[in-house]
Image (tube, rainbow, N blue to C red):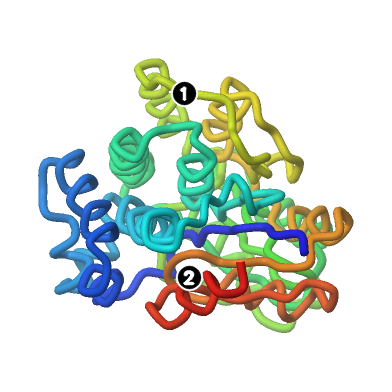
Amino acid sequence: MKYAFVFPGQGSQYVGMGKELADNFASAREVFEEVNEALGENLFKIMVDGPDAELTMTANTQPALMAFSMALVRVLDKDFGIKLKDKAAYVAGYSLGEYSAACTAGVISLNDTAKLLRLRGQAMQNAVPFGVGGMAAVIGLSYKDVGALADACSNGKDMCVAANDNSDGQVVLSGAMSAIDRAIEIAPEFGAKKCIKLAVSAPFHSPYMASAADVMARAFMEVEAKDAQIPLIANVLAQPITDHKEIIKQLIAQVTGTVRWRETMNYLDEQGVTDLVELGAGKVLSGIAKRGYKNINSISVGSVAEIEELAKNL
């Protein structure tokens, strides 16, 4: 058995997340309290009670998803005596999930991770005025072909790029709304089955996020970091790293860089990973693994029953 633990990104959040876990495990409640303390506000109340519009604000979504993932990690450790550094061959996370992976691997503390993600969410939202940029999912084209589509829709300052390489035939464009609208219009000419605008508030993982990357670079100067206890597969490299300086460099780079999830999954497959466990909200990453990787047994863990089942198998 060779395990990889992965952590979800934005879009997997839902009102009520973490409540069942907190009701059943004091160790989960501790995590939510520590995150509240780090942020100086009751984020857990927004996670549990909403409203949805408040939870989906980027500055709330990012630390909230991390808090839920880290509560699961803490429950495994404190309630079931399972330390992921003894079980995991690799950790990886999708976009903000890479921060959850870094926290799990012991690179940054929970307190710092919460503060960094709150800042990251704010900086990414502030990088581009609302409505000026956006994202669209392109279905049925390779990453290379989506790159060609992006080039065809870009002119000077109004541009878009292939920002999220999720899986074969599912790539996300990010950039100026004018370029995104153009991509939706001409995508069928490139052979795309669909090109769908996403309900996001900014063009994430594109050059338009440069000011947010600068904010994160300054913030990381104040953070104490340690080398990873578990190899972390960075979004922008699709390769494992353990040196804390390199991990921080890549966390900053992924603000404007491509999320290379398809290549990350290919790497895990090539390394003989037998089991992929998605810790947190939703089933997006385990779903990608189920659809494309027959050799990998993939599960999502977010409920009490799921964590009890995982602990038995680990």
Earlier residue among tags 1 and 2: 2
Q: Quadrant of the C terminus?
A: bottom right
Please give the residue where the numbered disc 2 appears in the rendered image: 198
Q: Amino acid at mark 2?
A: Leu
Point out which mark residue 115 bears: none
Query: Is 197 placed left or right of 160 in the picture?
Result: left
Residue at the spot 64% in from the left edge and 53% down from the top edge: 87
Residue 170 locus on image (x, y percent): 70, 71
Residue at 38%, 21% in the rendered image: 223
Q: Nearer the viewer, residue 1 or 95?
A: 1
Q: Position of residue 191 (x, y in %)?
A: 81, 77
Q: x%, y% of residue 53?
A: 21, 69
Q: Tell me the residue that label 1 is attached to.
A: 225
Residue 99 appears left or right of 124: right
| Image location of residue 189, percent across then percent down | 78, 75
From what the image shows, is residue 241 above or below residue 5?
above
SS of the residue under disc 1: loop
Q: Is residue 270 above or below residue 235?
A: below
Q: Quadrant of residue 243?
A: top right
